[in-house]
Image (spheres, grey):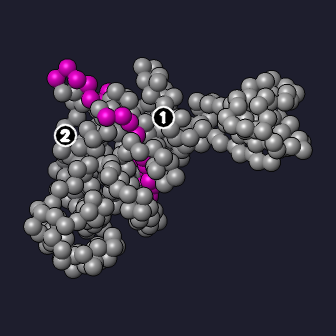
Amino acid sequence: MNTTAIELTHLRKAFGPLQALDDVSLTVPEGQIWGLLGHNGAGKTTLMKHLLGLLVPTGGEVRVLGRSPTGSDARALRREVGYLPETVAFYPELTGREILKYFARLKDVAPSQCERMLADVELTDAADRRARTYSNGMRQRLGLAQAMLGHPRLLLLDEPTAGLDPIATQRFYRKVKQLAGEGVSILLSSHILAGVERHVDRVAILGSGKLLAAGTLGELRARVRLPVVIRVRLSGAISEWPAVAGEEGRAAKRIGDGEFEFRVPEQGKLYLLQQLTARDDVVDLSVMPPTLDDVYAHYCGVSEQAPTASAEGAEQ
């Protein structure tokens, strides 16, 4: 039977006068990669701790794989959930293999899985080195290996690429894509939006404990109606934009010799492109829709508004 990976219903969490989570409702179907986005203090880690059963809600309900993470079968449920914390710390004098076998015992997982996990994160050759000799990227990969022990159905990854170099980040996302292809549900918390944008199916944006928006990047772009950026380069060093017909033609901004930028509404994009491509002096042209950074900045800039789109698109 197909079930949801995560279901939050009017979730609230208060720490004294601080409302860390405020009426958060979200549904995450199984088998998808979701980005959980928000500034420091937005409530991302608090939300993850509820999914792990480490915190009890002040109000509302949390369901993980159809069950309560603090209910009578919480122990069994935890074996189906893997967690990579924001700060990865291991006993420095233990080897990578010893660390993984230690976690296997804690999770009641067969030690034979450790070799497969080490291979999956490309640490077989370093398995007998002490953890203190590992780079940041190697520690992150070892952390991912322990999260994958037991073949969890849901992975919770908190700032997993923090401190990683570009090559290590590519390897990490390659592995995440592979796991999603195998049916694993993944919730990835991050503030590195440029990396997240290309690797997630949907995003949920938190701000001051509220869910500001959720859905695919295309859905969020359509809601916020941010301008499309069109950049054009003309032959020769031209300092002023030659007027083109229509309102859009008067909005050019010079960004270099013979290079100009337009910001136009989505509905005006095709008309302006027709005007530009008809010119003989256009040598290059690029169209850039709003990025995840743009969408995120828009929603966080209106965080005081009620989250009317709290779970739109989440059940598609």
Label 2: which secondary element = loop
**Residue 308: percent from left, percent from top:** 48, 26
Marks 1 and 2, how far apart in space?
27 Å
Quarter of the image where the N terminus is located: bottom left
Label 2 packing within 10 angstroms: few (<14), some (14-19), many (20+): some
Label 1 sits on residue:
296
**Residue 62: percent from left, percent from top:** 29, 41
Label 1: which secondary element = helix
Q: Residue at x 29, y 73 (%)?
A: 123
Quadrant in the picture for residue 32: bottom left
Task: State which region is magenta.
Answer: 16-40
Q: Nearer the viewer, residue 29 or 278?
A: 278
- Classified by dominant secondary structure, the portion drawn in magenta counts as strand
Label 2 sits on residue:
55
Q: Nearer the viewer, residue 125 or 172?
A: 125
Q: Which mark is residue 219?
A: none
Q: How many marks?
A: 2
The reply, left or right, for residue 66 in relation to residue 32 is left
In this view of the protein, can residue 103 be seen by the observer?
A: no
Q: Residue at x 27, y 59 (%)?
A: 136
Question: What amino acid does circle 2 point to?
Answer: Leu
The reply, left or right, for residue 313 in relation to residue 56 is right
Q: Residue at x 20, y 20 (%)?
A: 17
In the displayed structure, would residue 262 be above or below residue 135?
above
**Residue 125: percent from left, percent from top:** 27, 79
Q: Is residue 38 magenta?
A: yes
**Residue 118: percent from left, percent from top:** 28, 74
Quadrant in the picture for residue 239: top right
Q: Residue at x 19, y 71 (%)?
A: 96
The reply, left or right, for residue 115 in relation to residue 188 is left
Quadrant in the picture for residue 39: top left
